[in-house]
Amino acid sequence: MAWERKAQEAGRRLAAIERDHAPAVFASSLGLEDMVLTDLIIRHAPGVGVFTLDTGRLPEETYRLIDQVAERYGVRMMVYFPDMRAVEEFTRRYGMNAFYESVPLRRECCRIRKVEPLRRALAAKKAWITGLRREQATTRQDVGFSEFDADHGLTKFNPLADWTLADVWDYIRALDVPYNVLHDQDYPSIGCAPCTRAVAPGEDLRAGRWWWESGETKECGCHAREKEPLATRHGAA
């Protein structure tokens, strides 16, 4: 089956990352892809650290999944939080839900709650791993298996770059991997609660993220595309 072959390849990539790029960490947003990667890392590269970013506005279902990961795998994820002083200053100046007002304000909220904590999480690391897939969005169609992340000065790996959503679900169902129950309520992509909604049949996978914006702006800044490709960009890690 396609997902089994891809899972074997991803396992080999992860083992190589653990061996050749230590210390490496996996940045989990607790989406479907990230649950697959969590399972693969536990099986093939247990030396890779796993962390997530708690923006302070996540859905309750996401918090429950964090506990499920600990119960299932016996590993408690590292959690990074935003600087509360920066959050206080932003909300006092612009309001609690200023991100609805403009793209610059939304991106500033993302910078405070996600980009800056990510910078701290990646400090002193040689590589980070993400669940990016080419199928996810128009902004991700050229995602490679590996690339140099100039923003953070390290190598970034996307082991599931060529996976389809069907591959992801096949893996989850075959191995009974825990996942966010919001996915069963038409939430294919889950971020902060006020910035995420369910999608209608036929809508883009990320149509429910920042739904009031155009497709070209729907990134938080953690995955800036000004990357320098490696020789292995579309090959194995």
Image (tube, helix red, strand yellow):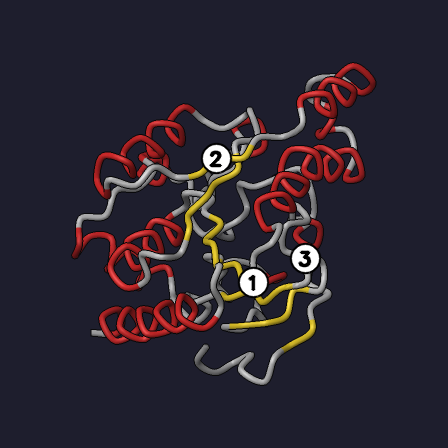
The CA distance from mark 2 to mark 1 is: 19 Å
Q: Classify residue 95 as left or right of residue 136.
A: right
**In the image shown, does 166 or 106 lie closer to the viewer?**
106
**In the image shown, does 25 or 109 lie closer to the viewer?**
25
Label 1 SS = loop
Mark 1 surroundings within 10 Å by alpha-carbon count, few (fewer than 14), some (14 through 19), many (20 or more): some
Quadrant of the image occupied by residue 97: top right
Residue 187 point in image, percent of width and height: 42, 40
> Pointer 2 and pointer 1: residues touching (CB < 8 Å)?
no
Work out whether mark 2 precedes mark 1 in sequence or the reverse, and give the earlier one.
2
Amino acid type indicated by mark 3: His
Work out whether mark 2 precedes mark 3 in sequence or the reverse, and give the earlier one.
2
Residue on which disc 1 sits? 126
Residue on which disc 3 sits? 152
Quadrant of the image occupied by residue 230: bottom right
Please name the residue shown 70% across and 55% down the image.
Answer: 216
Please name the residue shown 40% across and 70% down the image.
Answer: 19
Amino acid type indicated by mark 1: Lys
Discs 2/1, front: 1
Amino acid type indicated by mark 2: Val
Label 3 SS = loop
Residue on which disc 2 sits? 79
